[in-house]
Amino acid sequence: MKAAATAASATRAVFADYWELTKARLTFFVLIVVALSAWLAGAGSADTSTGVGATGGVWIAMLVAVVGTGMVAAGAAAFNMVIERHADARMPRTWNRPLPSGRLRPYEVVWFGAVLTVAGLALLGWAATPLACGLAALTSVTYLAIYTPLKRVTPLNTYVGAVPGALPALVGWAAVHGELHPGAWALFLLVYFWQLPHFLSIAWIYREDYERGGFVMLPRIDPTGAMTGRQAVMGALTLIPISLLPALWRLAGPVYCAGAIVLGVWFAWRAIGFARERTIDSARCLMRTSLLYLPAVLFLLFLDASV
């Protein structure tokens, strides 16, 4: 019995390590965006779809998009941990990850990432559309081959990294229709600009960690935080009109618009508070607000579009 319990505990520990490789919390936000994008693309128009929505319904298309994109995103996260394992070992908040701690070896993680990526792309290409597959591949490539290296070169990496962060909004739409409507780009811009104050707040909170890891985040060249605060405010303010674009393309109505404006003003107010104080607490407050803002505005979009 004791041996069985020990083996079960070891299995759970290994599972937990592989689960950590997927950056599940970040991936979860990605999948919310994919699901909503697919639903908006196909709601009430499955008969015009060129993807699985044409024969299996919008819900199947959404499921394929979420599962396929989720595997690709998890695979990219695993590859990212291989690339950044030495930097992770120098940062207190990441030194205990599976690779820097030695619990997993790089080749194991590479295989894990490769299997997930290939399986996800194959699913999207076979059960969804070639465009969805291509966009998911582009997301992975830009995240790993462009954004990840730029983190050691320029603080502009945040603006570049927001592109692969927002591309899943296009994947969901493409999985249903096989083409991109302006509404898909509205979602892309919404997610893109949301990331700016979100990741700038994180960069400020963990600025010492990032410096130890050799990452050139904005706070590294902005020790007072004045520039970081201004850019967070600019991103949050820009997000207010951007969040109204779905209504322009008739994806939602006045209920969504009113809610998006209220949420946007709240988000911008938190960003202004961070810009004024530039403390860990104000940055953490902005980060938490961002984590509430995105699900809330997407939920409003879903509700208003459903009416």
Image (tube, rainbow, N blue to C red):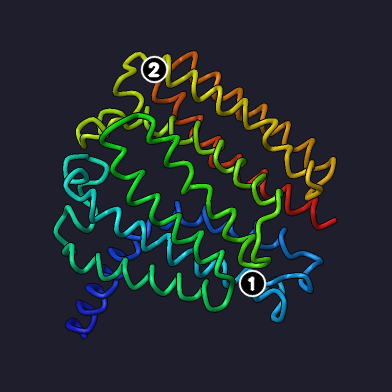
In this rendering, which labeled residue sits more in front, label 1 or label 2? 1
- Name the side, left or right, on which 294 lies relative to 158: right
- Residue 82: name its quadrant: bottom left
What quarter of the picture does the N terminus occupy?
bottom left
| Residue at point 72%, 31% (across, down) | 262
In this rendered view, identify the residue nearer to me: 267 or 1: 267
Say which element carries label 2: loop
Q: Is residue 303 above or below residue 147?
A: below
- Residue 218: name its quadrant: top left
**Of all residues shown, which one is farthest toward the left?**
102
Give the alpha-carbon distance from disc 1 to disc 2, as whole Å. Answer: 44 Å
Say which element carries label 1: helix
Q: Position of residue 252 (x, y in %)?
A: 80, 48
Residue tagged by mark 1? 61
Residue tagged by mark 2? 225
Q: Are marks 1 and 2 in contact (CB under 8 Å)?
A: no
Q: Is residue 143 above or below residue 17?
A: above
Q: Position of residue 113 (x, y in %)?
A: 32, 66
- Residue 36: name its quadrant: bottom right
Q: Position of residue 229 (x, y in %)?
A: 47, 19
| Residue at point 54%, 24% (across, down) | 271
Q: Position of residue 241 (x, y in %)?
A: 70, 31
- Name the side, left or right, on which 173 lies relative to 206: right
Of pointers 1 and 2, the one earlier in the residue sequence:
1
Image mark count: 2
The amino acid type of the residue labelled 2 equals: Gly
- Name the side, left or right, on which 184 lies relative to 147: right
| Residue at point 34%, 18% (across, down) | 222
Local crowd size for mark 1, using a 10 Å CA cut-off: few (<14), some (14–19), many (≥20): many
The amino acid type of the residue labelled 1 equals: Ala
